[in-house]
Amino acid sequence: MDIFNMLLQGFWVSVIPGNLLACIIGVIIGTLVGILPGIDTVSTIALLLPFSYGMDSTAALIMFAGIYYGSKYGGSTTSILINVPGEAASVVTCLDGYPMAQKGRAGAALSVSAIGSFVAGTIGIVGLTLLAPPLAKAALAFGPPEYFAISLVGLIFLSKLTGTSTLKSALMAAIGVMLSTVGLDSMSGISRFSFGIDELDRGFDLSILAMGIFGIGEILSTMTQINTATDIPLVKFKDLYPTREEWRRSIAPMFRGGVVGFLVGLLPGPAATISSYLSYALEKKCSKNPDEFGYGAIEGVAGPEAANNSAISATMIPLLSLGLPFCGATAILLSGFMIHGITPGPALITEQPALFWGLIASMYIGNVLLLIINLPLIGIFVQLLKTPLHILMPMVTVLTLTGAYSINNSMFDLIWVVIFGILGFLLRRTGFEPSPLLIGLVLGSGLERGLTQGLIICNGSIWAMITRPISATILSLGVIALFYNVVRWFTKINCAEKKVNC
Amino acid sequence: MQDKSVATTANKYPSKPITFIVPFGIGGGTDLVARLMEKSAPAYLGQSLVIINKPGASGTLGWNELSGAKPDGYTIGIAGTELLLQPLYGPSKYHYPTALEPLAQIVSLSMVMAVKKDQPWQNIDDLIAYAREHPGEIKYGHTGVGGLGHVAGEAFAKIANIHLEQVPFQSGAEATASLLGGHVQVIFINPASTKEYIKSDMLKALAVSGEQRLTDPVYTTVPTFKEQGFDVVYDNWYTIAAPKGLQPEVKGKLVDGLKAMINNPEFKKNIEQLGLEISYLGPKELQKKWLDDSEQLTKAVQETGILDKIKDQKK
C-alpha cells in the first residue's frame, strides 16, 4: 500500500505544469531520435545537457528519461517503411516489418509496434515500481562467469533468426565475434588487429556497424534495384490499422516480449538490442506458423518492439536503485542526474522520494503520451512511402552519416559506416542475412570478457566457472534446448525417409 | 604593425566559443567534470565551452588532437593521469608533458581500497593476514590495465608482500557492481565510485592512497596507506591543458578565468557533490608536478612488473 501512496505523490509531482511540459518535450524529442536513423540517444542527451542547466532538476531528469524511453518507440518506423533501422534495437524489426510493408500492411506493423511498445513499456514500469530494490540486488548475483554463460547460450540461439541456411547464419555470427576482438584488449591493455591505426583501438561500435550494414547497405540495395517505386503498394485508410486476425496474433507476443525485455534489461550490455533478438527467436519458437517468419509475420514485429521498450524500463532499475549505469544511455542519464546535483545510489529512494517517484510516475504518463503521439503519426508515416525514393534515400543517407559522426566525433567512423554499408550490400546480394553479425559483435565482447575475468575469479578452473549455480542453470537450459533441436532434426529426417518409403 | 595586430587579437580573446576536448566517452568521470565546467564557463571565460568527446586508446586519441591543435586558445581540453601513464607502455605520437601546456588543476583525488561491508577485515593488516593464509584467493578489481587503480593495487601487493590477482573491468560501475555482488573481494577505485555505497553501509574503505586523508565526511575516518605503514601514494588528478605555444595574454586570460572558476564556492560545491575534491594548482606548479609524477609512475610501473607484463604481451 505504501508504494501506491508514494506513487500517487509521484503523480502529483509529475503533473506540475513544468514537469508535465518537460515530459512532453522529452517524449517528442525521443520519438524523433528513434525515427531518424543515425541520431542516437546518448549524443542527443549530451547535446541537450547545457540547455537543462536553467531547468528545475526534477523537470530536467523527467525530460532526459523521456528522451531515453521515447527513442525506442520510433525506432521501428524506418525499419518497417524502408528497411533502414532507426536504432540498433530495431534491426530485428526489419526482418518482418519490411516484408509486411511490401505487402501493404505497413500501417498494421506500425500500429502493432506502437501498441506493443506501450504495453511492454507499461509492464516494465510496473516492474520498476514494485520490484526495483530486490531486482537490483538480484542482478548483482550475475558476475563475469554468468555473463559468459549468457553470451554463449545467446550466441547459439540468436545467431539463426531467419530462414537462410544455418551455416550462413553461423558464419555471420562468427564474423561478428571476430569483429568484437578488434581494439584494446581489456586483459592486457594492448591493441589487437588494429594494424597500428590508433582509431581502431576503440573497436567497432555497435551503432556504427548497424548504421553501415543495415542503413547504408539498404540504401545501396535500393539504388541498384530498377523501378522500385512501383513495388510499394498504396495503402488505403482502412488498411492503416491491424485486422482482427493480426490483433489476435500480436497480443501474446507483446506480453511475452515485455517480460523477456524486462529480464534482459536488468543485466549489463545493450539490453534493448539483445532483448529484441531474444524476443524474435522466442516468437519464432512459439509460433504455430514459423515458416512465415522473415516474410511478414506480425509476431516478429510485435514481440521485439515490445521487448526493447520494457528493457529500457528495466535498465532504469540498477541506475535508480543502485546508481550503477549498465549501458551507455543510462551512463549519460547518470551524468544528467549528477550535474543537477542528484547522486543516484542505494539511498536515492529514501533521500529524494519526490524525485524518484515523480520520475517513475512521469514514465507512466510519458508512455501514454507516446501512444497518443505515435498512433496518429502512423497515417503520416505511411504517406512517406509515396515520397520518391530518389528524394527519400539521400535524406536518409545524410541523416545516417551525420548521426554516425556524432557518436565519437570521428571522420574515421564515417569511413567505416561506408565500408560496412558496402559489405552489407554485398552480403544481401549473395543471400546472407547480416543480422547475426550484429548479435555476434554484441555478445562476442561479453563472451570474451566474461571468460577471461571469470577464469581469474575462479582461479583458472573452467569447471568451477560453469558449475556456479546461476551459470550452470543457464548453460543447462542451453544444452537442453540444443539437444531438443538435434533430436527434432533427426526425427524430421526419419519421418521424411519413412514418407519416401511409403 | 604586426605586433599590434597580434595584441589586438589577444585583447579580443575570446571572441568565439572555446572547443573543449574530452578524451573519454560521454558519462565518465572526466566528462562529468567537463560538463560542470561547461555550466560555469560563460561567467568566467567570457565564452561558452563546446564539449567534444574523443574517446579511444585510453585518452591518447583526444590528447593527440589537442596537442596538434592551433595554440590560439580556442582549443583546450581535460587530462588525467593516463596522460603520463599511457606513453610509458608504448610509443605515443606526442610527448604530452612537453607538447601540452597545463593551465589549471581542478581536482586531485586518491584511490580508495574498498571491500564489502560484511568482510571480517577491519584494516589492511587483517586483509594481508588473510591473503597470506589463503594465497591467490583475493581478487581485486580496477578500471583498466596500466591505469592508476592497477598501479596502486600492484604496488600495494608488492609492498605488503602478498599475491593479489587483478581483474580489469570496463568502468567504475562494472567494478563496483562486481564487488557488491561478491565476485571480486577488493577494488582500487576513485572515491566517487564508492561513496554512495559506503554511506549506505554496503561497502567499507580500508585505505586511501593520498598523502593525506580525504576531506569528504564519508572518508575522513579512512586512514591513508602511509598511516598504516605502507608507502603507497598515488593521486589521480584532472587538469586543463592547451597545446603548447599560447600567446602570453591569451594564456593569462585562460589561467585567471579558470582559477576564479575553480575557486568559486558554487563550482566547489558541485564538484564535491560528485564525490571529488577541489585542489587548485597553477601552471607553474603543475608543470613541475607532471614531471615529478611522470618519474614516480615510471618507477612504479617498472617495479611492479606492469611494464614488463604489457611489453611482454606486445611481442
Image (cartoon, coloured by chain):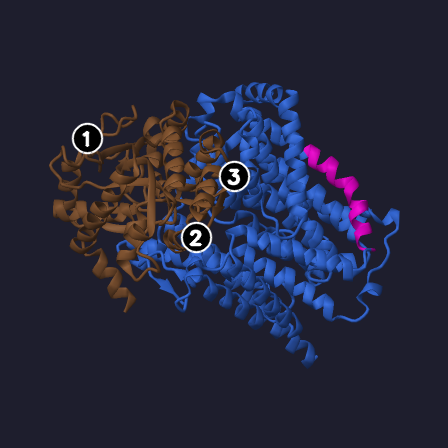
So how many labels did they put on this image? Answer: 3
Instruction: Please state the extent of the stretch shown in magenta in the rendering.
Output: A368-386
- Kind of residue at disc 2: Ala
Q: Is residue A407 left or right of residue A14?
A: left
- Chain letter for the blue part: A
Q: Chain of mark 2?
A: B
* Nearest to N terminus: mark 2 or mark 3: 3
Residue A378 inside the magenta-drawn segment: yes
Q: Nearer the viewer, residue A298 or B97?
A: B97
Q: Is residue A400 left or right of residue B115?
A: right
Residue on which the image places disc 2? B69
The main secondary structure of the magenta stretch is helix
Name the quadrant of the C terminus of chain A: bottom right
Residue on which the image places disc 1? B223
- Give the colour of chain B: brown
Residue lying at 47% horizontally and 64% vertically, measured from the top left: A179
